[in-house]
Image (spheres, helix red, strand yellow):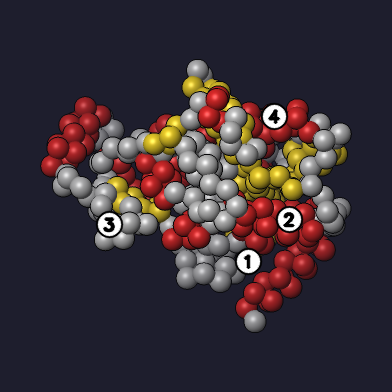
């Protein structure tokens, strides 16, 4: 009996597994490392508002958080963003934005912080617990310096890094819509003419989605990009102990490939994809497919191969931010490729 032909059967199996799941599976031996079993329901809290060196809550990243217009008004650089009758507080971290107007602004979107093991158990990466508003602000200041002191902004995706929402619901069209509206609000508030977008991994899905929607993106840089979502979902669903369709319905995910024909053509944005062919998180073939689809649609993306230094050959966010900074300075593709090669060599020393 096929799950695709009998969705009711799959829902029944999922319900039985939920009933049989062990209570308290979210409890970990370490208070700062919560877990959620594959079928446990999140328990959202009111959005915490860390400041300075205070760390972000891994519990809220795992379970979600909620806010209100009044609560969001107390969040530093908080934007109350509504979509289809529901709102979230989206926090951003600016550096160097002028109140009177900004010709070009660099914007960064980070990747996922929630992972699943082969049994479907959800957990938050250790690196997330080391982050704080101060560390993000320092990153944006460094990125601005790389770009010749041009303004930079880090926009926190729903549910993580200070934004309310549910990180369990990543990949869905709502996340793209919220980020799109947040960029609109920043554009209106600071009179921005154009954006250079950079995103890593699932943050690249955001960038690709905004590229499909916006005419004010002059350049987009994606690293280790989750840009062919259906392909990647199919790849990982076949490798988990639990069938992926029991954990989520990937048919509801937003796939940037489906809307490539909506990318602005007058003028055409500069598009860079930076990939490690040995990526063990987002398969290289899916990024290659996206690039080929762009070329088939008449664009001329630069596809740069790199070697990530982490064991899973995935972390290329700094490479992407360097490329975006050089684009902001008007550097040529040849100069950017040379600079990225030098950067990679420096990382290996």
Q: Are marks 2 and 1 in contact (CB under 8 Å)?
A: no
Residue 125 pos. (x, y %)? 43, 57
- Name the quadrant of the N terminus: top left
Depth check, mark 2 against mark 4: the one in front is 2
Q: Residue at x 69, y 29 (%)?
A: 185
Circle 1 sits in a helix, a strand or a loop, which is it? loop
Q: How far from the left and from the top, in percent, is residue 274?
A: 64, 58
Sequence-wise, the earlier of marks 3 and 1 is 3
First reached walking from the N terminus: tag 4 or tag 3: 3
Q: Position of residue 192 (x, y in %)?
A: 80, 34
Looking at the rendered image, the quarter that the C terminus falls into is bottom right
Q: CA distance from mark 2 to mark 4?
A: 22 Å
Residue 141: which disc?
A: 2
Snapshot quadrant of residue 80? top right
In-image side of 29 versus 113 (left or right): left
User: In this figure, which residue is indicated by the disc labeled 3?
Assistant: 28
Left or right: where 52 falls relative to 246: right
Q: Which residue is mark 4?
A: 184
Q: CA distance from mark 2 to mark 3?
A: 36 Å
**Which residue lies at the image location 58% right of the left edge and 33% below the top edge?**
74
Residue designated by label 1: 306
The reply to whether dot 4 and dot 3 touch (C-beta < 8 Å) is no
Residue at 86% from the left image edge and 34% from the top image edge: 100
| Of the two numbered discs 2 and 1 in the rendering, the one whose residue sits closer to the viewer | 2
Compute the Cα span from label 4 to label 3.
40 Å
């Amino acid at each position: 009996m096929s799950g695709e032909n009998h969705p009711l059967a799959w829902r029944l199996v999922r319900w039985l597994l939920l009933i049989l799941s062990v209570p308290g599976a979210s409890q970990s031996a370490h208070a700062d490392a919560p877990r959620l079993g594959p079928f446990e329901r999140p328990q959202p809290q009111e959005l915490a508002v860390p400041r300075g060196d205070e760390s972000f809550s891994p519990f809220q990243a795992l379970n979600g958080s909620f806010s209100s217009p009044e609560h969001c008004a107390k969040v530093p650089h908080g934007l109350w963003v509504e979509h289809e009758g529901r709102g979230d507080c989206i926090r951003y971290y600016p550096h160097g934005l002028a109140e009177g107007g900004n010709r070009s602004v660099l914007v960064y979107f980070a990747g996922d912080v929630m992972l699943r093991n082969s049994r479907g158990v959800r957990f938050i990466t250790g690196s997330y617990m080391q982050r704080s508003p101060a560390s993000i602000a320092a990153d944006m200041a460094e990125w601005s310096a790389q770009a010749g002191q041009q303004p930079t902004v880090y926009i926190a995706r729903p549910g993580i890094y200070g934004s309310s929402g549910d990180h369990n619901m990543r990949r869905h069209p709502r996340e793209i819509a919220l980020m799109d509206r947040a960029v609109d609000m920043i554009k209106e508030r600071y009179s921005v003419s154009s954006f250079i977008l950079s995103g890593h991994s699932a943050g690249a899905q955001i960038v690709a989605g905004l590229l499909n929607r916006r005419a004010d993106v002059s350049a987009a840089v994606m690293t280790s990009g989750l840009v062919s979502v259906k392909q990647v979902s199919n790849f990982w669903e076949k490798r988990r102990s639990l069938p992926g369709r029991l954990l989520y319905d990937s048919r509801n995910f937003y796939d940037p490939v489906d809307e490539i024909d909506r990318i602005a053509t007058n003028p055409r944005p500069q598009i860079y994809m930076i990939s490690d062919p040995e990526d063990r998180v987002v398969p290289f073939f899916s990024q290659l497919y996206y690039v080929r689809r762009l070329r088939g649609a008449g664009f001329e993306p630069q596809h740069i191969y790199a070697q990530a230094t982490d064991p899973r050959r995935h972390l290329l966010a700094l490479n992407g931010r360097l490329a975006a900074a050089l684009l902001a300075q008007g550097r040529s593709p040849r100069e950017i490729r040379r600079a990225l090669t030098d950067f990679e060599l420096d990382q290996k020393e």
